[in-house]
Amino acid sequence: PFLRHNQNVGRPRRHYGSSEAVIAALSRSYDSIWKKYIEVSNPPTTLYHYCRHEAFCSIVRGGMLRASDVWCMDDQTEITYALQDVLGPIVAERDGSGEEKYYLRGVARPEVIKAVCSTWCTHIACLSASAEVPSQWKDYAGCTGYAIGFDQHALGKWCASRNIALLPMNYELSVQQKILREFLESERGIELTRLGAKEVGAATVREVRSHANKYLHSLTLSMKSEEWHRQQEWRILVV
């Protein structure tokens, strides 16, 4: 009874200030924020995918729902809204001494953002929590198409088994700001405590911040402007 099996025996330990340890800490922070703000305890039982007749036939016959490259979407504000309207003002903040608070000094022009983010192969498939959204019928189903219902629990289980996110969109600016600021504050604290007092190369810092950028990118894809809240959108997100 005094001996307990140690599950960590045989596992190589990460150095506290190594890039692997810092990236692992970032990952834990990201997971915590995702669970706190994005996961919902009482999701709708059914999610609907609006589509035209041709797409409906393709989905039913092929048993496949296609995800689109986010940078090939007609409305690029789907991506740029969160980066420019939510993240931009936050990273422009200064601390008490007038220095930048976060590792990001600003948000680049849309074409620069696209050049960077498009290398991450991000795809989404859009659904809605309601089958009665007029704008969805008009824009995606052509007024005469279909709203295909998917069991949310089964779809979520399928996505989780493939490490794919199924998430509701957030339309509230104050919450969006909390999400991004909390992650940036966490990243800042991790850098200060794990890298600040150590001699680390520029390559290590770049690697850590590259992972931070990917996490930020994922978080921003859960956000849309309040004007679209009637869509009640959910997304299948593949990054």
Image (cartoon, rainbow, N blue to C red):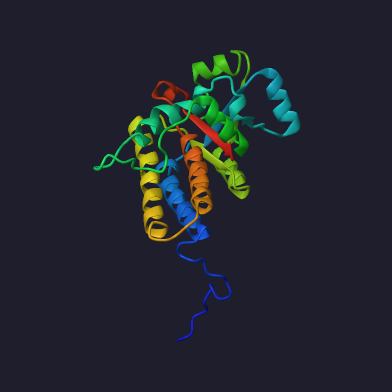
Residue at image x 40%, y 27%? 85
Disc count in the image?
0
Q: Is residue 141 left or right of residue 1?
A: right
Kindly tell me whether residue 130 is visible in this rendering: no
Q: Is residue 10 above or below residue 71?
A: below
Where is the C terminus found, in terms of image quarters? top right
Nearest the viewer among 33 and 212 is 212
Kindly tell me whether residue 88 is visible in this rendering: yes
Q: Is residue 81 left or right of residue 100?
A: right
- Percent across and percent down for residue 192 are 37, 54
- Percent across and percent down for residue 169 are 46, 33
Looking at the image, the residue that sits furthest to the left is 96
- Percent across and percent down for residue 81 are 45, 26
Nearest the viewer among 130 and 167 is 167
Nearest the viewer among 114 and 173 is 114
Residue at image x 53%, y 51%? 203
- Percent across and percent down for residue 93 are 31, 36
The quadrant holding residue 42 is top left
Q: Is residue 98 above or below residue 229?
A: below
Looking at the image, the residue that sits furthest to the bottom is 2
